[in-house]
Amino acid sequence: MAREASADAGGVPVELLGDYLRLLTDAAVTGRRPRRAELDAVGAHGRRAAEQGVSAGRAVRLYLSAARRVWRQLPHLDRSDDSEAVRAAADAVLHVVDTAVATLAEGYAVARRELVRREESLRRELVDDLLRGDSDLGGLVERAEPFGLDLARVHQVALAAPGRRLPDTEAAISALERAVFDRLGDRDVLVATKEGLLVVIAPADPVAGDRGRGPAGNLGTLMHGELDRLVRGRPWQVAVGRPHPGVYGIARSYEEAREALTTARRLHSDTSVIDAHDLLIYRVLLRDQPAMVDLVRAVLTPLAQARGGAEPLLDTLNEYFACGEVGTEAARRLHVSVRTVTYRLARVRALSGYDPADARDRFTLHAAVLGARALDWPRKPLPA
């Protein structure tokens, strides 16, 4: 009967039944109910089923199939004309089935939670070591294999920052896993948390001429679209690092995504999806901060003498350069007249000595404006 029940359940090991068949026959013959120790043994079999990778449905089917077969093989009930005796036996057997299956499922659930917690801990440790980039390479490759991560491929890292602190990140992680796994598959993708941010490590084989955006180039858009559906956490901001090969490429992409997120916050940017590639100029500018501070001080601080301060002039320069030095477009973006833009550009030339229309001066002014945004000047004083 045990072997036939195992076959019904798809080949589940018969050892998971333990003394369950004896409990059923005892209940049918004597009406005896299971003792606590016997139920504890059933719960242990449930935990063992989870550890062996047997699905909960197949484990339950094993127990139900065994009960059905035991009932059919009870000869004293088959020949009995006493309906009360049959009813009492059926009640006792159903009680064993009900209690045993519930205990089996409870043991299974406990083991699954422990396995999930253990896997989550291992995944978090793996992600931390991958993003840090200073761990043993051979050990990382071995630890990444159970998660389906091929460290020889090209990967990129994306970080998602919630608008306010999430009390529970499980819903956000589940939403991201569903969306990313559906698009990219569940191999070579890791989703975790780090320092209050959601982290996604995904494959991205770059294509020449696509500015570093490969098949996963829309990873940031995909993540933001899924997270924005959640009630909590909005507004979300997602930063995506550039694709890089190998183990250390993951750490490099993570640093780029983190720098992009930090830079966007310093620029007071409300852009939903930030591409680290688009902010490379700020990495160059801020690499030598003393030189950048000196440039901003020499070129732009005279603008503070203007009526209304330097900020309106800086905003005008920023939009003027962003739209390709087209005055009408800059005026449209600033919601002012073309005459106002022309007047402000003239004030910049008069106060700073640099002409936005001159090719040589334009580069200096543009670099200084980008540096001022990165330094958050004039909202904050320049570093000493």
Image (cartoon, rainbow, N blue to C red):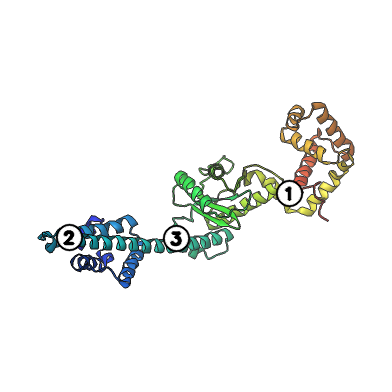
Write the residue at 84% across / 33% down. 344
Type of amino acid under label 2: Glu
Instruction: Give the mark nearest the N terminus, 2 or 1.
Output: 2
Quadrant (top left, top right, bottom left, bottom right) of the C terminus = bottom right
Instruction: Give the mark nearest the N terminus, 1 or 3.
Output: 3
Res. 201 visible in picture: no
In the rendered view, would you say 339 is above or below 317?
above
**Foreground pick, 20 / 251:** 20
Q: Which mark is residue 84?
A: 2
In the rendered view, would you say 347 is above or below 300?
above
Write the residue at 84% across / 44% down. 299
In the rendered view, would you say 55 is above or below 269?
below
**Foreground pick, 323 / 99:** 99
Write the residue at 33% across / 63% down. 104
Q: Secondary structure at mark 3?
A: helix
State the residue lying farthest toward the bottom. 37
Which residue corresponds to mark 1? 285
Type of amino acid under label 1: Leu
Q: Which mark is residue 116?
A: 3
Write the residue at 50% across / 48% down. 175
Type of amino acid under label 3: Val
